[in-house]
Amino acid sequence: MRSVVRTAPLWLTLAALTACTGSSPDPVASPSQQSGEAPPPSASPSGPSVEEFEQALRARLRVPALPSFTLPTDLLSSPRDEDVRTQLGLQPGLYDGIAVVGARCEPDGEARSADSGTPLTGAEAAGTFKDGERTVTVAGDGTGVYDAPGLHIAVLADGTGVYDDGATRLSVRPGGGGTFANGNRRYNVDPGGTGSYEDDELRFWVGPSGSGGFDDGTTRVSRNEQGIVSKRGDDARAAVVEALIAEGLPRFPPVPRIVRVAPSGPTCGTIVRLDASVLFGFDDVALAPEARELLVRVADLLKHLEEPAVVAGHTDGVGAEDYNQELSRRRASSVRDELVRLGVPPGSLEAQGLGEGQPLRPEALPDGTDDPAARQLNRRVELVLREG
């Protein structure tokens, strides 16, 4: 059977709808890399400013990013790939900031990830994979189901889908509606933007005809359908809340379809892929705090293998090509420097910036509209471990 590969994050943050390398914020990290809610920015000694208050509130209202999945068939079936995956402690088939895929050599000898092969369509794209613990079924239209112990993912028609791992439950409905629950965070959004968000610290809701409210214990705002507003607390913060009520709650982005590919070229190594949205902040080359845990695991792997690796930075295609090239080079260097700091011999690592030149997927859908899932996938740093 040809490989089935889930090539883009299954669940995206609201920011991913406009995220790119040069014009808007990257998505927040997935729940496994957060404490359960988007942390507010650092406060000034006198307390958060109005701008910081708005930024923190908008961050809470983003739909959290959840892992996508790849199907470990022949693309991930070499003993080397499986050994690397096991040493990194990865659950088979999931891409939660870090993934392992096979490397295939192009005719020019350059190593590319196996999931950058030619996408299949129709009957060729359908298939089923079972290994005793996992069952994965993919239809020719890009819908499918992943079932493993403690995990159920379904990619359904019309951009809808379901994710349930026992702790996090998410359902995306037609038109941007959906529900999310994880610990103390609960989110319910209707396609029109009405609904509610709540956690242990605040509640925000939007009702019909511009009504809504907010309460975090210090600032309280309530607006009825007649436009009458009652409030308590700081007037500037209340104005921020009123503006957000008028905007409506962020909608859930549609779930991208599963892409099945036909790998090309002979196997020539293994690639460890790191999501740049987890490694770095927007338009930044400094490593984010949540990147450290991932890179500790990668450093331990490299020290165990005692093999050279190329650290390759990639961007999406938004922005000037020269700028993206330099950004990818500096990000690759940041990752290399951190791995060296963690004990990997410096002579075993080479940093390269490849810019936007090696996208994994086209960044436009067949109808010509932007594909934010492909853009997020294309923003990455890959460690290429060549055979021999």
Image: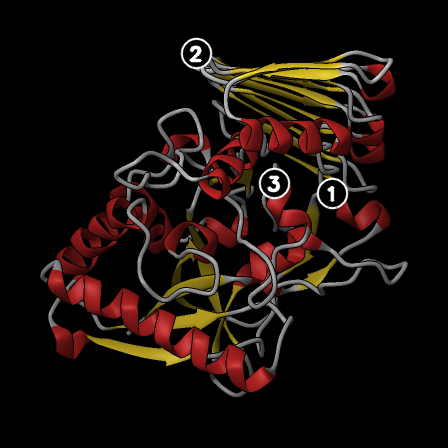
Q: Nearer the viewer, mark 3 or mark 1?
A: 3
Disc 1 on helix, strand or loop?
loop
Q: Amino acid at mark 1?
A: Arg
Q: Which mark is residue 224?
A: none
Q: Amino acid at mark 3?
A: Leu
According to the image, label 3 marks what residue? 12
Residue 150 appearing in the image: no
Q: Amino acid at mark 2?
A: Asp
Name the residue at 87% across, 63% down: 368
Q: Which mark is residue 200?
A: 2
Name the residue at 42% across, 55% down: 281
Q: Position of residue 73 (x, y in %)?
A: 54, 45
Q: Residues within 10 Å of mark 2 (few under 14, many from 20)?
A: few
Q: Is residue 119 left or right of residue 272?
A: right
Q: CA distance from mark 3 to mark 1?
A: 13 Å
Disc 2 on helix, strand or loop?
loop
Q: Position of residue 129 (x, y in %)?
A: 60, 34
Q: Check if mark 2's residue and mark 1's residue have beta carbons within 8 Å.
A: no
Give 189 or 381, whichever is nearer the viewer.
Answer: 189
Q: CA distance from mark 2 to mark 3?
A: 23 Å
Picture mark count: 3
Q: CA distance from mark 2 to mark 1?
A: 34 Å
Q: Which mark is residue 257?
A: 1
Name the residue at 59% across, 58% down: 24
Q: Earlier in the sequence, mark 3 or mark 1?
A: 3
Give 110 or 227, whichever is nearer the viewer.
Answer: 227
Q: Position of residue 72 (x, y in %)?
A: 51, 43
Q: Earlier in the sequence, mark 2 or mark 1?
A: 2
Task: Give the quarter of the figure containing the C terminus.
Answer: bottom left
Q: Position of residue 235 (x, y in %)?
A: 56, 27
Residue 312, compared with residue 83, is above or below; it is below
Q: Quadrant of residue 178?
A: top right
